[in-house]
């Protein structure tokens, strides 16, 4: 079979490789790979900024956002041949630490977890892959190819879960949410907010094109200037841009919660008024929470959210597809790209 393979730190050596067929072990599903999605994390791996190789190897299969169809499933697994599935990314610390032992490797204390396509395990960018049944989630057939959005949707499902956990101390329900960034994560975070019946505002830089249209298609409000955004009960920051992160936190209302999802790629100094930030948090009983990765329960929440979504709107998030035979074309962005997917059969 064929697979998209890389040697981390060697962006000049990206290949479509002939790769060994997977062997489904006891309790594992054998899956026909349909699509994978390109994420900024994949670029970090290609450029060597993430230590990724499986032990003893000089190449790995890339991609952690997956969609596949079950070929074989063990009896009693809850899966059947033909089921649409997405694979979960993180595997727990083998020791394990207390969070991993509780099924929450997204909170791993020791950092000894592994991740499909990210850290020390091959990814899903091959024409067939195997996965333990407990690390797969079944998708509604109506979702179709948009099932490749399951993993990024699980990330924002966890963010909203953090809003519920931290915000639950205030005996109130959030009414207004600000989402910064209208990329895949921001749009999916906005979608989950709209599904909750919250008034959603999305901030991004572009003036025209697919991003503002997608925000308005949700029934949310699109902004290009933070000054036009009302104070919010929830802020979900998806850009990692330092100044915007601080400025968006200052939009928090009393008892509000901000969840930071964006990863910063710059060490540039950011002008900031520490006293203003301190007073916003202290006088407002506000909270700022970082969130990374997701747990199996968030994959299930993601699958349910995708099934509830307007499927026509959801399909517009996949703005470009490239075949596996030319998968490196996915790395060259166009202005209108939201989610780029690689078709594994081609």
Image (spheres, helix red, strand yellow):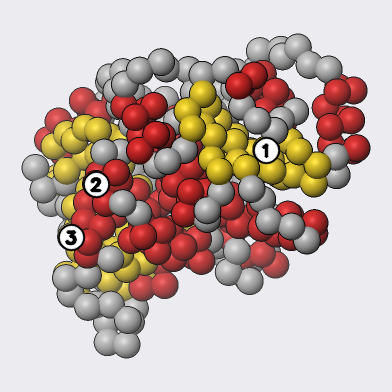
Q: Crowdedness of circle 2 by 10 Å Cα count: few (<14), some, many (20+)?
A: few
Secondary structure type for disc 2: helix
Find the distance from the CA under tag 2 to the CA under tag 1.
Answer: 29 Å
Find the distance from the CA under tag 1 to the CA under tag 3.
Answer: 43 Å
In percent of width and height, residue 240 lies at: 58, 28
Q: For this rendering, which residue is in front, 198 or 244?
A: 198
User: With respect to residue 77, does 341 lie above or below?
Assistant: above
Res. 312 mark = 2
Q: Residue at x 34, y 48 (%)?
A: 149
**Residue picked out by circle 3:** 32
Q: Residue at x 30, y 65 (%)?
A: 139
For the question of whether residue 104 can be seen, the reply is yes
Q: Residue at x 31, y 27 (%)?
A: 210
Secondary structure type for disc 3: strand
Is 294 situated left or right of 164 in this image? left
In percent of width and height, residue 246 lies at: 71, 25
Q: Quadrant of the C terminus?
A: top left
Quadrant of residue 105 in the image? Answer: bottom right
Q: Residue at x 47, y 38 (%)?
A: 220
Q: Earlier in the sequence, mark 1 or mark 3?
A: 3
Secondary structure type for disc 1: strand
Tag 2 and tag 3, C-beta contact below 8 Å = no
In percent of width and height, residue 39 lies at: 38, 36
**Residue picked out by circle 1:** 232
Of badges 2 and 3, nearer the viewer stands: 2
């Amino acid at each position: 079979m064929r697979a998209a393979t890389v040697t981390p730190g060697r962006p000049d050596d990206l290949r479509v490789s002939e790769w060994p067929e997977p062997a489904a072990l006891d309790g594992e599903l054998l899956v026909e790979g349909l699509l994978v999605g390109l994420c900024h994390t994949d670029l970090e791996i290609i450029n060597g900024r993430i230590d990724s190789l499986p032990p003893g190897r000089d190449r790995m299969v890339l991609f952690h956002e997956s969609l596949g169809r079950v070929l074989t499933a063990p009896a009693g697994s809850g899966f059947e041949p033909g089921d649409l599935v997405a694979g979960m990314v993180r595997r727990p610390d083998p020791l394990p630490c207390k969070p991993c032992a509780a099924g929450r490797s997204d909170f791993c204390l020791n950092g000894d977890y592994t991740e499909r396509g990210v850290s020390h395990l091959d990814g899903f960018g091959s024409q067939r892959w195997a996965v333990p049944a407990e690390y797969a989630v079944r998708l509604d057939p109506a979702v179709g190819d948009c099932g490749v959005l399951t993993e990024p949707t699980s990330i924002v499902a966890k963010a909203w879960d953090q809003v519920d956990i931290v915000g639950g101390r205030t005996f109130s329900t959030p009414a207004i949410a600000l989402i910064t960034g209208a990329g895949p994560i921001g749009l999916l975070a906005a979608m989950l907010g709209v599904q909750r019946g919250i008034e959603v505002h999305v901030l991004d830089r572009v003036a025209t094109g697919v991003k503002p249209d997608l925000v308005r298609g949700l029934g949310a409000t699109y902004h290009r200037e933070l000054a036009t955004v009302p104070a919010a009960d929830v802020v979900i920051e998806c850009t990692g841009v330092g100044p915007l992160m601080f400025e968006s936190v200052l939009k928090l209302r009393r008892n509000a919660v901000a969840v930071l999802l964006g990863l910063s790629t710059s060490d540039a100094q950011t002008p900031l008024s520490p006293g203003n930030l301190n007073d916003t948090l202290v006088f407002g009983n506000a909270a700022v929470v970082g969130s990374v990765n997701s747990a199996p329960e968030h994959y299930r929440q993601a699958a349910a959210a995708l099934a509830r979504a307007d499927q026509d709107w959801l399909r517009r998030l996949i703005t470009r597809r490239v075949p596996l035979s030319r998968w490196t074309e996915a790395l060259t962005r166009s202005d209108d790209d939201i989610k780029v997917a690689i078709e594994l059969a081609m």
